[in-house]
């Protein structure tokens, strides 16, 4: 029996052979990856029919390298100094994934991708010199799912050809436009991104957007990132129309206050509002929004008042690096049976808040880098049976709070580093 198992195992191990990438025969500065072959065969360097990937990285090309007529899983021409794509650039190459990032491309001919228009599913043109989305070249691609065009110089979506996204209107699933200097998102139907009916993931971080109007976003988007822009108000009316949205990131804007009520009750898994200068988060959204988690780090919150998070149905809250000094005893009322993660790192808290006594299901508690000198015996008693991670580093404790810790039954980690503990 053991012999047969050994024979079968060896047969399976020896059934295929995955060759290591090797210099390409048509251009030895590039690396070619070959498809898996049977164990008793090895690829020939000139056997272009078995090549699945071509990678030319960091090779200074003054023009696109000559490639044979092949069909690839992936083509990489990166960090090579290319400045444009013309009609003949790809030659006869067809590829599912094309990565052309970190070049100097400023122009893309409208016929650049015509030979691979029915095959390419992912195209990366990030970190180039494009001043507009090259829609004339892209609109003929039949099944493009993912378009990466971040870190270019695209200040406007509304251009002569911006109304024609071609096949992408129904095929595109994710669009990455971060770090482009975009100044506005058109809301008129002809030029709006709402024409992209299937986009689920939209990244607009690091632009110069001052507002987001209703009708300017893809209607089916699920993950939307608008961090590091110039927004001064919560884009509630635009968000209200996104019925499939699950995650919204608005970090590092200038949203100092939030006063918005959704038309219909909405649920998000995550809302990030860090780095906005918020001074008050009481009764957010008037109980019309429930959240899995909320990020409020790096704001200017000084206190949490009675029922601050009422109606949000929170599981996770991050309040790191605010100016919190006071937390009302009933601050967590309304979420006491749902909250599992709290982070209060880097505030001005001097005593373990009595508000913690309301919490029943906490698993992770971070109150490190505060000014806590003493912990009462019953400070954590309400979650002795649930807490797994307790972070107390960087406080002013002079001894291990043994009496406060002895009741834990599931604690996996406790951090007391960087205190003033003299003995254990």
Image (cartoon, rainbow, N blue to C red):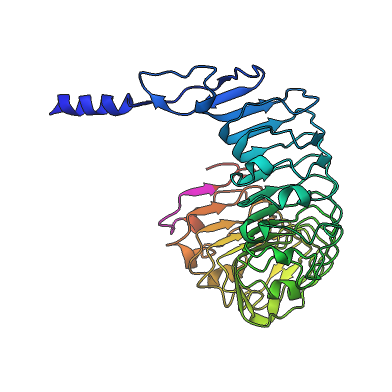
Q: Is residue 111 above or below residue 337?
A: above
Question: In the image, what residue occupies the spot 59% across and 35% down?
Answer: 74
Percent coordinates x, y for residue 192 in the rendering: 77, 65
Task: Judge left or right: residue 225 versus residue 206.
Answer: left
Q: Position of residue 237 (x, y in %)?
A: 75, 76
Tell me where residue 310 sits by quadrant. bottom right
Say which quarter of the image contains residue 308.
bottom right
Q: Quadrant of the N terminus?
A: top left
Whether residue 269 is in magenta: the answer is no
Marker count (numbered): 0
| Residue extent of the magenta highlight | 406-414
Residue situated in front as seen by the camera: 288 or 206: 206
Coordinates of residue 138 in the picture (x, y in percent): 72, 49
Q: Is residue 283 visible?
A: no
Q: Quadrant of residue 251?
A: bottom right
* Residue 302 against residue 128 in the figure, above or below: below
Q: Position of residue 2 (x, y in %)?
A: 15, 27
Q: Residue at x 75, y 35 (%)?
A: 102
| Above or below, comparing residue 113 to residue 250 in the picture | above
Tell me which residue sits at (74%, 72%) in the image: 238
Which residue is rendered at x = 81% and y = 60% of the image? 253
* SS majority, magenta: loop
Q: Is residue 323 visible?
A: yes
User: Observer-nearest residue: 270 or 110?
Assistant: 110
Q: Is residue 408 magenta?
A: yes
Q: Nearer the viewer, residue 120 or 345?
A: 120
In this view, the residue in front, 181 or 253, is 181
């Amino acid at each position: 029996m053991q012999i047969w198992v050994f024979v079968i195992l060896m047969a399976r191990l020896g059934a295929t052979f995955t060759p290591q990438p090797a210099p390409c025969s048509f251009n030895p500065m590039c690396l070619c990856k070959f498809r898996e072959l049977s164990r008793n065969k090895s690829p020939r360097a000139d056997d272009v029919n078995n090549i699945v990937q071509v990678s030319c990285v960091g090779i200074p090309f003054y023009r696109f390298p000559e490639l044979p007529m092949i069909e690839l899983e992936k083509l990489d021409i990166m960090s090579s100094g290319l400045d444009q794509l013309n009609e003949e650039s790809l030659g006869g190459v067809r590829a599912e994934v094309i990565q052309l990032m970190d070049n100097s491309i400023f122009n893309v001919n409208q016929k650049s991708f015509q030979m691979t228009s029915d095959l390419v599913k992912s195209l990366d043109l990030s970190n180039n010199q494009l001043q507009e989305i090259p829609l004339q070249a892209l609109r003929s691609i039949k099944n493009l799912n993912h378009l990466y065009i971040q870190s270019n110089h695209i200040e406007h979506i509304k251009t002569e050809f911006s109304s024609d996204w071609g096949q992408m209107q129904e095929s595109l699933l994710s669009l990455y436009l971060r770090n482009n200097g975009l100044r506005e998102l058109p809301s008129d139907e002809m030029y709006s991104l709402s024409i992209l009916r299937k986009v689920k993931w939209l990244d607009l971080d690091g632009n110069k957007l001052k507002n987001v109007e209703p009708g300017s976003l893809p209607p089916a988007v699920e993950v939307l990132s608008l961090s590091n822009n110039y927004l001064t108000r919560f884009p509630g009316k635009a968000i209200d129309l996104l019925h499939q949205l699950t995650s919204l990131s608005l970090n590092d804007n200038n949203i100092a206050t939030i006063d918005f009520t959704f038309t219909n009750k909405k649920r998000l898994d995550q809302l990030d509002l860090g780095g906005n200068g918020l001074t008050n988060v009481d009764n957010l959204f008037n109980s019309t929004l429930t959240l899995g988690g909320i990020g409020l780090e790096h704001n200017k919150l000084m206190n949490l008042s009675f029922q601050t998070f009422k109606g949000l149905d929170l599981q996770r809250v991050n309040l790191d690096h605010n100016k919190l000094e006071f937390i009302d005893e009933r601050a967590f009322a309304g979420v006491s049976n749902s909250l599992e993660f709290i982070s209060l790192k880097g505030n001005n808290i001097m005593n373990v808040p009595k508000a913690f006594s309301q919490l029943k299901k906490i698993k992770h508690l971070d109150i490190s880098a505060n000014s806590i000198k003493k912990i009462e015996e019953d400070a954590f008693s309400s979650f002795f049976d649930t807490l797994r991670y307790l972070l107390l580093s960087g406080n002013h404790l002079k001894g291990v709070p043994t009496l406060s810790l002895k009741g834990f039954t599931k604690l996996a980690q406790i951090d007391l580093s960087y205190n003033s503990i003299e003995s254990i």
